[in-house]
Image (cartoon, rainbow, N blue to C red):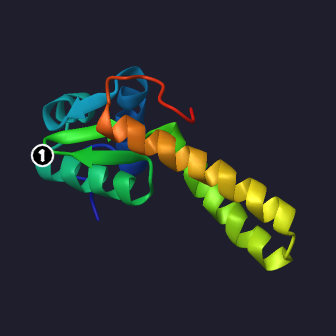
Amino acid sequence: MTNRGGRLPAVRRRAILDLLAEQEFVTIEQVQAATGTSSSTVQRDLGALAAAGALSRIRGGARRRSPDIAALRSALNQLRRTLDSGDLHTVERTMRWALSLCEGVRYRERWPDAGNGPGA
C-alpha cells in the first residue's frame, strides 16, 4: 500500500504535535500546510491523536491538551489502584488530589483566558 500523503502517519502526527507545542490552537489549513496532506488526511490524523489523548478536537482544528487532564487521568488511575489496597488514608489523599485537579480543569473550561485557576 502506498502513502498518498507522502509522509508516514507517525511523521505527520509528530508534526501536528510540534505545531501544538508552539501554539495553543491549530487549524486544519495550518496542519495541511505543515504536512502537505489533504483535509481528510488531516481530519483522520487529528481524530487519531484525539483518541490517544494527545490533543482536543475543536471546530476547524485542534487545541493543545491541558496538562491538568493528563494529571487528572493519572490521579484517577492511582485512585483505582489505591481503592483495592484498602489504605483509607491514601485513598482520601488521592481523592483530594483528584478533586483539586477537577476543579482546575472545570475553571479553565469556563474561563479559558484566566490562566491559572483554583487548584492549579
The residue shown at (19%, 29%) is 30
Residue 78 versus residue 90: which sits nearer the camera? 90
The secondary element bearing badge 1 is classed as helix
Q: Position of residue 11 (x, y in %)?
A: 41, 42
Q: Position of residue 59 (x, y in %)?
A: 14, 44
Q: Position of residue 80 (x, y in %)?
A: 69, 71
Residue 49 versus residue 111: which sits nearer the camera? 111
The residue shown at (83%, 68%) is 88
Q: Is residue 108 left or right of residue 36?
A: right
Kind of residue sitting beneath label 1 = Ser
The residue shown at (43%, 27%) is 21
- Quadrant housing residue 44: bottom left
Q: Is residue 69 visible?
A: no
Callout 1: few (<14), some (14-19), or many (20+) C-alpha neighbours within 10 Å?
few
Residue 82 versus residue 27: which sits nearer the camera? 82
Q: Is residue 77 above or below residue 49?
A: below
Query: Where is the N terminus found, in terms of image quarters?
Result: bottom left
Q: Position of residue 60 (x, y in %)?
A: 13, 41
Residue on which disc 1 sits: 39
Q: Is residue 55 above or below residue 35?
A: below
The residue shown at (14%, 53%) is 40
Q: Is residue 81 visible?
A: yes
Residue 33 versus residue 66: which sits nearer the camera? 66
- Quadrant housing residue 115: top left
Query: Where is the C terminus found, in terms of image quarters?
Result: top right
Q: Is residue 40 left or right of residue 100?
A: left
Q: Is residue 72 above or below residue 78?
A: above
